Amino acid sequence: MNRTALAVLFVLTASTALGDTERSRFDQSFPADGVRSIVIDNIYGPMTITTGAASIRVAAEIKAIGGRRSSASGVLAEWPLVIERKGSALEVLVDAPMRCSDRGWRCSHDSDDRDRGRAEYAFTIEVPDGITVEARTIEGDVDLRGTVDEFILRNVNGGVFFEGDARGGSASTVNGPVAGRFRTTPTVDSKYSSVNDEIDLYFPPALDALFAISTLNGEILTDFDWQATSVAEMERTRREGTKWVVRNAGRTGVRIGSGATRIEIDTLNGDIMIRKGN
């Protein structure tokens, strides 16, 4: 990549060759003064992010796998971890030969993992309360827990999970579930989506939200008292114990409370649950 980095940090410790595989670890803390957001841009590997820390700690278990044209040690050199402070944002980026100039994850046509190998970063990240968290990967779960301002969580092959306090956010994946448990009522518009799995969200009992919901092969379930809106006409509605079950082939509008906050939920192949938390 053609980029001037404020900091390029790549620390290898206790590196052990296992055939054509090498493992290493990165672990470093950074001052949080003036940091209002953190962006973690991974390619292969899971991420666990927690809040409540006084500083920002970035730790990663790194596994480099060699390919037909690259050794594991060569992969480590070609997939560095780049950490940059940009104004009030701290960016944590797994660089790679196939990255685009705009930091998209695949531009090079010569990017077959079997040829070039790959590096997998399993991140554990600690941040202060109240900042915005953006995290994305294409393989491995994304798990955020704690108190944040807003969140943006992106995945392709893996689940997306949130538990804690937030004004709102967005979470999406292709092959995996989306699950969230809010301790406080969201106050900004939010969006959640999965293509091939369920979406399961818990909200406080005093929820005030207008939901615009779509599922092609699934049902919509909620234990909140709700009212239909004009987003789409209900096709079938039934009550199962304490839960309402709504099934339709288009977009369903569900108003809970005053409907002050708009929340969009979409999936193709999976149920959508809007649950009442404690």
Image (spheres, grey):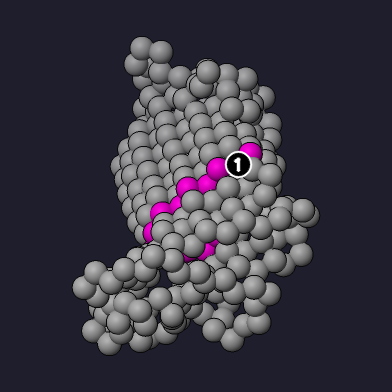
Could you say which is closer to the camera, residue 114 or residue 210?
A: 114
Amino acid type assigned to the residue bearing label 1 in the image: Thr
Left or right of 130 on screen, residue 26: left
Residue 201, percent from left and from top: 47, 33
Please, which residue is most extreme toward the left here?
19
In this rendering, the count of numbered labels is: 1
Residue 208 drawn above or below residue 49: above
Q: Is residue 254 visible?
A: no
What residue did someone put label 1 on? 51
Left or right of 191 on screen, residue 67: left
User: Which corner quadrant holds the N terminus?
Assistant: bottom right
Residue 173 drawn above or below residue 138: above
Could you say which is closer to the camera, residue 187 or residue 81?
A: 81
Q: Is residue 220 magenta?
A: no
- Image quadrant in which you'd find residue 43: bottom left
- Image quadrant in which you'd find residue 199: top left
**Residue at position x 38%, y 24% in the image:** 245
* Magenta residues (range): 40-52
Residue 21 drawn above or below residue 225: below
Residue 49, percent from left and from top: 53, 47
- Image quadrant in which you'd find residue 71: bottom left
Q: Is residue 46 magenta?
A: yes
Residue 125, percent from left and from top: 54, 51
- Label 1: state its secondary structure: strand
Left or right of 149 on screen, residue 190: left
Residue 165 drawn above or below residue 175: above
Residue 263, percent from left and from top: 58, 39
Left or right of 17 on screen, residue 177: right
**Residue at position x 35%, y 79% in the image:** 73
**Pointer 1: residues within 10 angstroms few (<14), some, or many (20+)?**
many
Please, which residue is most extreme toward the front here?
14
